Amino acid sequence: MAILIDGKETAKAVREKIHSEVEAFAAETGKRPGLAVVIVGEDPASQVYVRNKHKACAEVGMYSEVHELPADTDEETLLSLIARLNADEKINGILVQLPLPKHLDEKKVILAIDPKKDVDAFHPVNVGKIMIGDFTFAPCTPAGVMELLHHYGIDVCGKHCVIIGRSNIVGKPQAMLMLKENATVTVCHSRTVGLADIVRGADIVVAAVGRPKFVTAEMVKDGAVVVDVGINRTAEGKLCGDVDFDAVEPKASYITPVPGGVGPMTITMLLKNTLAAAREQLKK
Ligand code: NAD
C-alpha cells in the first residue's frame, strides 16, 4: 500500500510558514506583499479560481486586489491596466487569469507583465531563467509538485523521473525543476512511441495529460512514486486525475490523490512566489 501524499495538509503547513514570513516582512518593511489578479470575462471556473486566490492572500496577511473586466474588453484597455499595475508599488505580483477571450492575444499580454511581477512565471524572461536554473520563482503547479516531494522527503537526485505531458505550464517547467535537482528526466507526450515501457522504467511518474485513468497499473513499476497533476471530470461529474488510482495505489510507494493532492499546492505556490517577488523588489 502506498503512502498518500496529502496536498491539503502540506498546503496548510506551507501557508502557515508563509503567513509568519509575511508578518515578519510587514514588521520589517511596513509593507505587505501585494497581488493583483486580472480576470477578463465571466468564465465560472476562472471566477472560482480568482476568488480562491483573493481569499488565500487574505489568509496569509497579503494585500490583494481583483480586477474584473468585461468579456469584450479590448487589448488596449487590458494592456494599460497591466502597465498601471507594473508601476504600482503596492503590487508585487500580477496574475492574468487564463484562458483569455479569443480576441485577446495571450502572448502579448504575458509579455506586457513586468517579469519581476510575473508570479505565474510565464514571461519568456522567467521561462529562460528556469531553463538556466537561476530563478526567483517557478510556475505554480510544477513548483507545487516539488514542494510536495520535499515535504515527504522524496529526493529526486539520480532518480529517473518520467513526466507525461509537455505543456508550457506543467510538463516543460516540471522537467527543468527536476533536472535542477539532479534527476534524470524523460518527457513523454502525445507522439511518444512506447510510452508504457518508458513509464515502467520510472522511479517517479508525473502525469499531466488531462485524460482520466491514463496511467494504469501495468505502466507503473513496483515502488514508484506517482504524482497526478490531472484534473478531469467523469461522466457523473466527479473529479478525477490522470492516474487509475485504485489500481496503481497498491503498487506505488507514494501517490497523490485527486482531489487533495497537487491541486491545493498551486495557489500556495502563488503566495510563495508573491512573497519572493516582494522581497526581490525591495532589494532593488
Ligand atoms: P495540456 O492539454 O496543455 O497538455 C497535455 C499534454 O499531454 C500535452 O503535452 C500532450 O502532448 C500530452 N498528451 C495528450 N495526450 C497524450 C497521450 N495520449 N499520450 C501522451 N501524452 C499525451 O494540459 P496541461 O495544461 O499541461 O494540464 C494537464 C492536466 O493537468 C489537465 O488535466 C489540467 O486540468 C491539469 N492541471 C492541473 C493543475 C493543478 O493545479 N492541479 C494545474 C494545471 C493543469
Image (cartoon, helix red, strand yellow):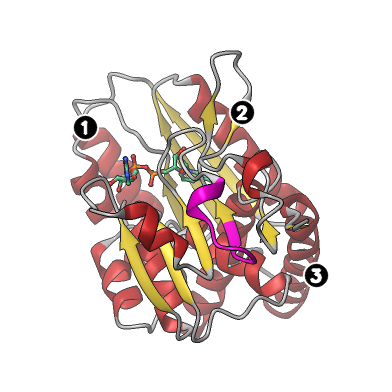
**Circle count:** 3
Is residue 221 rendered magenta in the image? yes
Q: Is residue 153 above or below residue 2?
A: below
Residue at the location (77% across, 76% down)? 24
Residue at the location (31% across, 56% down)? 113
Q: CA distance from mark 1 to mark 2?
A: 30 Å
Magenta extent: 217-226
Q: Quadrant of the N terminus?
A: bottom right
Q: Is residue 58 above or below residue 175?
A: above
Location of residue 162 by image quarter:
bottom left
232 or 173: which is nearer to us?
A: 232
Q: Residue 104 got which mark? A: 1
- Asked if disc 3 is less than 8 Å from ligand 1, the answer is no
Q: Position of residue 132 (x, y in %)?
A: 30, 83
153 or 173: which is nearer to us?
A: 153
Residue type beneath disc 2: Leu
Residue that badge 3 annotates:
20
> Which of the two labelled residues, at mark 2 and mark 3, occupies the earlier sequence position?
3
Q: CA distance from mark 2 to mark 3?
A: 33 Å
Residue that badge 2 annotates:
239
Q: Position of residue 142 (x, y in %)?
A: 49, 61
Residue type beneath disc 1: Leu
Q: Position of residue 268 (x, y in %)?
A: 64, 56
Q: Position of residue 276 (x, y in %)?
A: 55, 72
Q: Is residue 244 left or right of residue 192?
A: right
